[in-house]
Image (cartoon, rainbow, N blue to C red):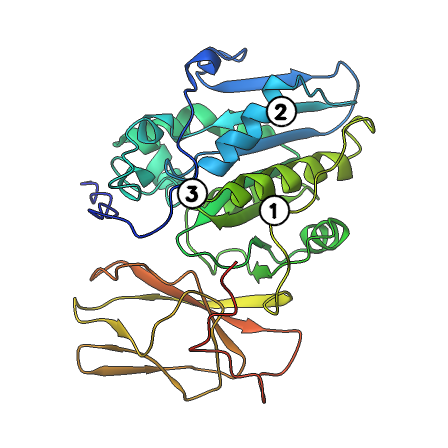
Amino acid sequence: MSVPPCRFSIAESDAPIELLPRDLSAWQQGNCGVDYVHRLDSGQQGPELVIQALTHGNEICGANALLWLLENNIRPLKGALTLIFANVDAYKTFDPQRPFASRCLDEDMNRIWLPSRLTCPNSLETRRAVALLPFVENADSLLDLHSTTFAVAPMLIYPQTSSNRDFADQLGFPFPHLLYDLGSYHPGILISEHEQNTDGGVSLVAECGQHFAKATTAQALAVTLRFIALHGMLDPAVELPEWGYQPDSSAGHYRIDTVLTAQSEQFRFAESVRGFEQYNKGELIATDDQELIAAPFDNCALIMPARVPVAGEEVVTLAERLDRSAAGQKQHGKQEQEL
């Protein structure tokens, strides 16, 4: 099987680069026999938590959050906490002139967590995933730290189960929550693989803000510490920081419905979009060559639109807002989401 190239090699960026990747070499030798994996064991009975950063190499906020835990000698009160720097090889290629190109080397590491891919790994990302898989499958709960292309509200993404929903609601995360049915959204994502191997645990993605903003690192640390604390594993002496961003009108619960793929190089959104623009049923979202793409239902929100649409690649996720009606709340074309 041939591996499609990683398609994120954008030549230049208009995104402000407020933070550059830090050197991780001091943490290469973990204590688990796998590079850049550190297991912190309390010696007391309790949950097995895994927090993963750098599933995408240019999403540096998670790496900064894990470095904070390691450098401040944070240790769990019970159970064990495993910290994973995932795609470090991609991270090392970061170039501030092409900051999106270091997302991956061979392929997207958050689409490969499938038996068919990991049984016969044939890319840098699948080989790394094979090394990490035992930690993922052994975890009671997992948090995967990410960031976004545009400066939209942070968000949580998780399979729609009672344990995930209850935990996320208790987390006090005052930003959008995106729920999906297992098997219906992005085959091969890490949290879906974990969800299939846990019994009542938690599987969360935290999208923490725009890739290179200082506030995004603050957001990643805030959600990481709260994740540990809600499992009863954080020393009360560790102060929980404020969220990196202020909540906005996008906060609420959304049901992920469809991931759209660009069918041609002529895919164009009908207007400038950043994410969380909301449409009523029938309103025009985009055109793809001669095809008109309209909102298939009311309260239809655009989630993580592609910066540069590429034929054959994912271009935007459509989600139904569950918390309130879109009537009188038409939001597309506005910039209120920018943080």
Q: Residue at label 2? A: 69
Taking the image as drawn, is residue 120 in sight?
Answer: no
Task: Report the residue that reaches farthest toward the right.
Answer: 236
Label 1: few (<14), some or many (≥20) within 10 Å? many
**Is 222 on the left-hand or right-hand side of 240?**
left
The answer to whether mark 1 and mark 3 are in CB contact below 8 A is no
Task: Check disc 3 and give the amino acid type.
Answer: Phe
Q: Residue at label 3? A: 212
User: Could you give the CA–CA distance between mark 1 and mark 3, rounded to whole angstroms?
Assistant: 13 Å
Position of residue 12 relative to residue 153, above or below, is: above
User: Could you give the CA–CA distance between mark 3 and mark 2, rounded to whole angstroms?
Assistant: 20 Å
Q: Tell which of 225 and 38 is nearer to you.
A: 225
User: Could you give the CA–CA distance between mark 1 and mark 2, rounded to whole angstroms?
Assistant: 17 Å
Label 3: few (<14), some or many (≥20) within 10 Å? many
Q: Where is residue 73 in the image (x, y as percent from the top left)?
A: 66, 16
Position of residue 82 relative to residue 147, above or below, is: above
Q: Position of residue 222 (x, y in %)?
A: 65, 40
Task: Check disc 1 and give the amino acid type.
Answer: Gly
Q: Position of residue 186 (x, y in %)?
A: 42, 55
Q: Tell which of 329 and 110 is nearer to you.
A: 329
**Is 332 on the left-hand or right-hand side of 7?**
right
The answer to whether mark 3 and mark 2 are in CB contact below 8 A is no
Dot 1 falls on a residue whose secondary structure is loop
Q: Tell me the quarter of the picture where residue 4 sits.
A: top left
Q: Tell which of 307 and 129 is nearer to you.
A: 307
Q: Tell me the quarter of the picture where residue 181 sits.
A: bottom right
Q: Residue at label 1? A: 244
Q: Nearer the viewer, mark 1 or mark 2?
A: 1
Position of residue 230 relative to residue 307, above or below, is: above
